[in-house]
Structure formats: C-alpha cells, structure tokens
Amino acid sequence: MRQRRLLTLGAGLCTAATLGLVSPHPALAAPGDCSHTSPTSRPTLTYGDTGTAVKQAQCLSNIWGGQPPKLALDGVFGSTMLKKIEWIQGCHGLPQSGVIENRTWHVLYHPALDCYDPYPS
C-alpha cells in the first residue's frame, strides 16, 4: 500500500512538473536573472575582455558555489573571474584554460549540482 502511494505521488509530481506546476531544482532552472545577453550569444571571452557578454558570464558563474560566492557584475573579465572560470572548467573535466568558449558557455548555462574539486585558495 505504501509503495503504491509513493508511485502515485511520484507520477503526480512528474505530471505537475511537465505542466509547469512544480518548480525545478534551482540548479536545474533556467538562469532567469541572467539576461544581459541572449543565451545564443556565446562569444569567446578571455582575461581582460569587457562588455555585456562578460557580465552574462559573471552572472551565470554566480549560480555556482565556490569562493568568491558572487562575482561583481561589472562586465570586466579580471583575475577573480579567471580563477572561478578555471575552477568551473575543472569541475566538468574541461581544460582549465580560463577561456570561455562554447563548451564553457554550455556548462555555465547548465551548472553541475555538485563539484568535488576544491576551490583554489
């Protein structure tokens, strides 16, 4: 009887999620607060770059944990952002180049639920 209730509850939650009645886990939700550029705008960014695309990457990286917990949304790709991008890349097994290219944009828009790499001090 208990198993049947759990299955019914699970099916109901799946249906509610499909209909948009239940919010997804925050890490799985679309980054609604990050609307500085279109999600399809994914230029290659490197240390020293500035502009709205950098601000978008800063905003998306703030969804992740790590230290510092939040980057300033100033649109400047500085050393603090470089360190955080390298850490995020390492969490996904990407080369830790610090360059934000298509694969790094992808992980910024789809953050991992957990990263077991310690944040560099």
Image (cartoon, rainbow, N blue to C red):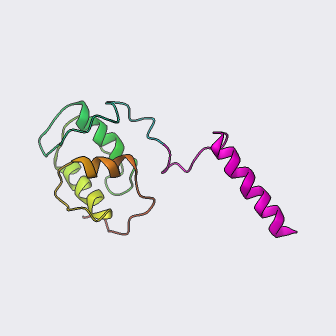
Where does the image place residue 31, in percent across and percent down from the top left? 43, 40
State the quadrant of the N terminus: bottom right
Where does the image place residue 69, in percent across and percent down from the top left? 36, 51
- At 33% from the left and 49% from the top, the residue drawn is 106
Q: Is residue 120 above or below residue 74?
A: below
Q: Count how many numbered circles sit on residues in the image.
A: 0
Query: What segment carries the magenta color?
Result: 1-29
| In magenta stretch: residue 19 | yes
- At 73% from the left and 55% from the top, the residue drawn is 11
Q: Is residue 62 above or below residue 54?
A: below
- At 38% from the left and 35% from the top, the residue drawn is 34
Instruction: Inspect this view and state whether residue 105 appears.
Output: yes
Q: Quadrant of residue 40?
A: top left
- Is residue 55 found left or right of 30 in the rendered image? left
- Is residue 22 found left or right of 91 in the rendered image? right
| In magenta stretch: residue 82 | no
- At 25% from the left and 53% from the top, the residue drawn is 85
Where does the image place residue 24, in percent across and percent down from the top left? 57, 47
